[in-house]
Image (tube, rainbow, N blue to C red):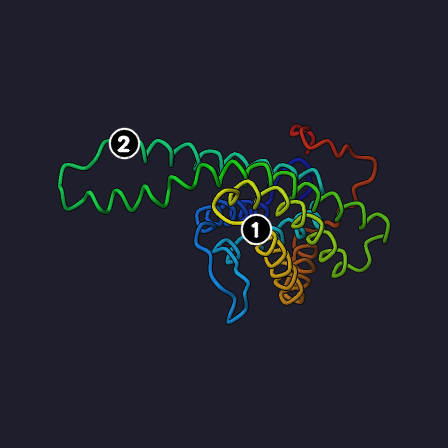
Amino acid sequence: MSNNNKFSTTFVWMAVLSCVCLTCSNIYVPRTWQVGNLPLQLTGGIVLFPISYIINDCLTEVYGYRKTRLVIWMGFTMSLLVSLSSLLVCSLPAPLSPESVPVAEAFSTVFTLVPRTMIASLVAFFVGSTVNSWIMSRMKLASKGKGFGWRAVVSSLGGEFVDSLIFFPFVFWGKMGALDILGVMFTQVLAKTAYEVIILPVTGIIVRSLKQKEGIDTFDNNISYNPFRLGDI
């Protein structure tokens, strides 16, 4: 990447994967499930959502905060598109065939939850991912690029905590009790952090490979951390 304002094919693929993981996770959130025989439950979003934070760490470590900020905004925009389109589809007239009515009703039962979920996710993802990237960037400068593993875990923990603090009360308030919401929040943050730790060896390999392949290792010296400066890449 000889020009810092250009994007490699690898960067584009990672950005697309991040957006897909985010939008799919929002659709999976209403499907909660019990963790073994424990009095704890997680949402279906746990399957893919942590990957978006892992990608966030990789992007910030290799390409820097400014390019990661652009990917965060891409995820935000794609989620908004899915939210608005789901509202449109669910508002369409009933199907002509009576046999198709139960299918349409089942579809609406699931996807009418998506807009509410998306609104919470838009705010939570934007704030949480920005916090994650900011912590990662600042810790890299402070450590002079050393200790990627613990920096990745700490930054993800901070971002996921903020994300859950915003997301779960908004989505589940009135549908679950306050203690149940707190339980889901705690379990979700714990599970996402464990996910990050377990896959950390793979993440480390990916980061080292990216740095070698792209020929860059970005340090965010003297940049603006303003999350709205999209033109600054």
Residue situated in front as seen by the camera: 24 or 92: 92
Q: Secondary structure at mark 1?
A: helix
Report crowding for label 1: few under 14, some 14 to 19, many 20 or more residues within 10 A (C-alpha). some
Q: Using residue 98 as the reference point, say whether residue 188 is left or right of it.
A: right
Q: Where is 205 relative to 104, above or below?
A: below
Q: Which mark is residue 21?
A: none
Residue at figure coordinates x 79%, y 34% from the top left: 223
Q: Which residue is mark 2?
A: 92
Q: Position of residue 39 (x, y in %)?
A: 54, 65
Residue 120 in picture, x, y percent from top left: 54, 39
Q: Amino acid at mark 1?
A: Ile
Q: Is residue 233 left or right of residue 147?
A: left
Percent across and percent down for residue 67 are: 66, 39
Residue lying farthest to the bottom in this orientation: 37
Residue 72, picture quadrant? top right
Task: Check disc 2: other Cα within 10 Å, few if <14, some if 14-19, many if 20+.
Answer: few
Q: Earlier in the sequence, mark 1 or mark 2?
A: 2
Under mark 2, the amino acid is Leu
162 on left or right of 33: right
Q: Which residue is mark 1?
A: 181
Q: Quadrant of residue 64?
A: top right
Q: Position of residue 78 (x, y in %)?
A: 49, 37
Contact between marks 1 and 2 (CB within 8 A): the answer is: no
